[in-house]
Each structure stands twice: as structure tokens, then as C-alpha cells.
């Protein structure tokens, strides 16, 4: 069996996770993506196939942000939770998108929980 690249391995994990997760209207899916420099978060309703809320470290509010990537992730987690509550979203299903649950992914999730999202 050939060895998998890092991206192929993440895709396999992602598909395995997505078989079990489904974002509904009552409980949409909080999906994250982590690149080398930035982090992105979306709250998605899989029934209507629409993105309800989005936040990323590329937002205008982060233009002059000084800090580590983990501090950026914490700020994005707080921002996504704040925007979700403005839209009336209280609880979500967390989709780590094939990334391991530590570091920036865990920081974003913990910050979103502290800011009021339930998952």
C-alpha cells in the first residue's frame, strides 16, 4: 500500500468525520479550516446548503492584529460565537475538518465555547 500524503490523510479523516456529522437548521455545523498562516470558521446549515455565519483571521478587524497564531485563533473563536449569537444560533456541531483537535483548532473551539456557543 502506498503511503498517503498529508493532504490525502486529512481528506480521509474528513470524510470519516462527515459521515457522522450533519448540520441541521436547529443545530448547524461549525466547520473550521486551518492554513499555515490563517484560520477560518463557518457555521453551515447542511439542509439548506447555506453558510449562516463566517469569520476568519483575514477579516478587516484583524488587519493590525499583533500576536501568535494561537491568539488569532482565540480571537476568531470569540468572533464566530459573537456573530452566531447575533443571528440567534446557540448550539452547533463542531466539525474539525480532518485536523487534529489540538493547538489552533482546540484554541478556536475553547474560545467559541467560552463566548457562549454550545457544542
Image (cartoon, helix red, strand yellow):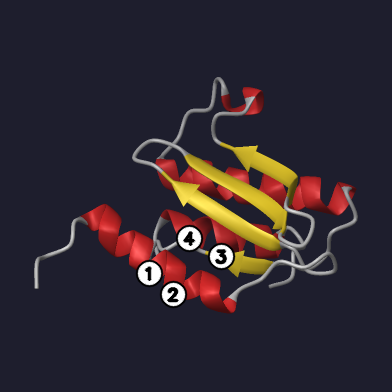
Image quadrant holding the N terminus, namely bottom left
Q: Earlier in the sequence, mark 4 or mark 2?
A: 2
Look at 35% across and 67% down and name the residue there.
12
- Residue 98 can be seen, yes or no: yes
- For the residues labelled 2 and 3, the Cα–Cα distance comes to 11 Å
Vertically, is 53 above or below 99? above
Residue 96 x, y percent position in the rendering: 50, 63
Look at 47% across and 58% down and name the residue there.
105
**What is the number of callouts on the image?**
4
Describe residue 99's horizontal placement relative to residue 117 as left or right: left
User: Residue 13: which disc?
Assistant: 1
Q: Earlier in the sequence, mark 2 or mark 3?
A: 2
Image quadrant holding the C terminus, namely bottom right
Label 1 Cα neighbours within 10 Å, binned few <14 / some 14-19 / many ≥20: some
User: Residue 112: which disc?
Assistant: none
User: Residue 97: which disc?
Assistant: 4
Q: Earlier in the sequence, mark 1 or mark 4?
A: 1
Label 2 Cα neighbours within 10 Å, binned few <14 / some 14-19 / many ≥20: few
Question: Would you identify the image quadrant in which residue 36 lies?
Answer: top left
Residue 63 x, y percent position in the rendering: 56, 21
Answer yes or no: do the residues labelled 4 and 3 have beta carbons within 8 Å? yes
Please name whichever residue, 79 or 24, is drawn nearer the observer in this view of the structure: 24
Label 3 Cα neighbours within 10 Å, binned few <14 / some 14-19 / many ≥20: many
Look at 88% across and 49% down and name the residue there.
87
Residue 11 x, y percent position in the rendering: 36, 60
Amino acid at each position: 500500500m502506498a503511503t498517503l500524503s498529508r493532504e490525502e490523510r486529512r481528506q480521509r479523516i474528513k470524510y470519516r468525520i462527515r459521515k457522522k456529522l450533519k448540520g441541521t437548521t436547529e443545530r448547524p455545523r461549525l466547520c473550521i479550516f486551518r492554513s499555515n498562516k490563517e484560520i477560518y470558521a463557518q457555521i453551515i446549515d447542511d439542509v439548506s446548503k447555506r453558510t449562516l455565519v463566517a469569520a476568519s483571521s483575514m477579516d478587516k478587524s484583524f488587519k493590525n492584529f499583533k500576536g501568535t497564531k494561537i491568539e488569532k485563533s482565540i480571537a476568531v473563536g470569540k468572533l464566530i460565537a459573537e456573530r452566531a449569537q447575533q443571528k440567534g444560533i446557540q448550539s452547533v456541531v463542531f466539525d474539525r475538518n480532518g485536523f487534529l483537535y489540538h493547538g489552533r483548532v482546540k484554541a478556536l473551539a475553547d474560545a467559541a465555547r467560552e463566548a457562549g456557543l454550545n457544542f
